[in-house]
Amino acid sequence: MSSETDETGAGKPPMRDALVAAAFRLFLERGYEQTTVDDIVALAGVGRRSFFRYFPSKEDVVFPDHERCLADMTAFLAGGSDDEPVRRVCDAARLVLRMYAENPTFSVQRYRLTRQVPGLRAYELSVVWRYERALAEYLRRRFAARREGTLQADVIAAAVVAAHNNALRSWLRSDGRGEAGTAVDHALAYVQSAFGGVPVPPVAEQPEDVVVVVARRGTPLWRVVQEIEATLGRG
Amino acid sequence: MSSETDETGAGKPPMRDALVAAAFRLFLERGYEQTTVDDIVALAGVGRRSFFRYFPSKEDVVFPDHERCLADMTAFLAGGSDDEPVRRVCDAARLVLRMYAENPTFSVQRYRLTRQVPGLRAYELSVVWRYERALAEYLRRRFAARREGTLQADVIAAAVVAAHNNALRSWLRSDGRGEAGTAVDHALAYVQSAFGGVPVPPVAEQPEDVVVVVARRGTPLWRVVQEIEATLGRG
């Protein structure tokens, strides 16, 4: 919608939102490359300076919420020194998912646009990189006492981002139908199971229940784990 | 070196190498932004058309070997349907390391340059993304029968790339001193241990040697795995 129309009826949207709405209307009608900042400000009914007050470039209007989301993520991670670290970064990744899921139509439109325009793809990669670094920096702090702390932090952060994006892209490809949160939870659980952040199941009912696994020395570790998972009913 | 000098004494280097050498000499002397394609071709003693025959843009001359390395990786992955899949992608990642390690001085210079120029950072991210996609596509094919195949493929590919890059960057930050291969082997072993690609140790000497692990139901899986690793002497 432009600044002249407000389909929600909740009053005139702020100028920043109007610019995003005008931009996307034009991107969808004419294509991204064929739309200029002048076209956007004309449709939004504001001046060029207003545009550049909010967005350093035309690319930035395509991703209007990532800076806020990155700030939210950084704040969230700054507060979580008691949580299990892998779980904490998974929860941080869910903040990004929430941003996409808040506005499925917009998110799906942007996904299609980004796939068509190489420059936007590059921009998105740099944004994803910043999220990954935020997660990795948090884990590096939490793992500071580990000999392999920076390696583990970098690998786990990358795995969390890849799992999140795998689920997010599936949801975007399905045109934002279905429950994005469930898919992301499922994907992140895979990372947690691989890197030690598996939630401890309740043990109250059978506190002394013991599992015995017998394996020939030389059995690949993954096979032993598979066996234990099956035995514990987590497979 | 320029096309006029050949410090190896092995004959005049190909024009492509001369262009790369001239470009880096100027990038280091004047800075990347201050160097034009005209400057590069003048120093190399060739025309502009020769430059653009080899490199679509000034950015591409900074990463002259990635296309070849990506092609090598794709070819390598096309041939590995018998190997354990996680091990295969780790071996594919080692091809990238080898490219860097072949020419430590050049790799360290480029690393410093890339950290200074945001446009080169973005270019590098897109290259890293292409390696990651090559690994993920291979794993997706190998995991085609798994219900979670694409998720696992994406996560493992990202973990392999992050581990490789963690070790590679440590080596580059140390000015290319030390054995890059050992650090990368170590980093990739961490990914293999997390995702089931642990090499099977030789079992010939004690074929019937059996390991028994007893764990209370409800013990976090990672603790059980830690215990097994310690018992098997892989910790």
Image: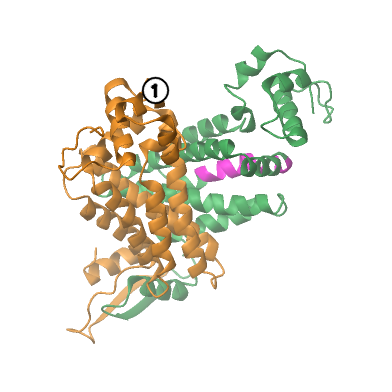
Chain colours: A orange, B green
Q: Nearer the viewer, residue A215 or B124?
A: B124
- For mark 1, give the secondary structure: loop
What amino acid is found at the position of numbered circle 1 in the picture?
Glu
Q: Position of residue B138 (x, y in %)?
A: 39, 39
A78 to the left or right of A226: right
B161 to the left or right of A231: right
What span is in magenta? B92-105
Crowd class of label 1 (few under 14; some 14 to 19; many from 20; radius 10 Å): few
Q: Position of residue A45 (x, y in %)?
A: 31, 29
Residue at 44% across, 66% down: A78
Q: Nearer the viewer, residue A127 or A193?
A: A127
Decide whether residue A175 is among the magenta residues. no
Q: Using the image, determine if residue B84 lies above or below residue A199.
A: above
Q: Can I make out residue A26 in this image? A: yes
Q: Main secondary structure of the magenta part?
A: helix
Q: Position of residue B201 (x, y in %)?
A: 48, 62
Q: Using the image, determine if residue A104 lies above or below residue B198.
A: above
Decide whether residue B98 is among the magenta residues. yes
Residue at 42% across, 73% down: A81
Residue at 70% across, 30% down: B34
Q: Position of residue B113 (x, y in %)?
A: 66, 40
Residue A43, quarter of the rendered image: top left
Q: Which residue is mark 1?
A: A33
Q: Using the image, determine if residue A188 lies above or below residue B95.
A: below
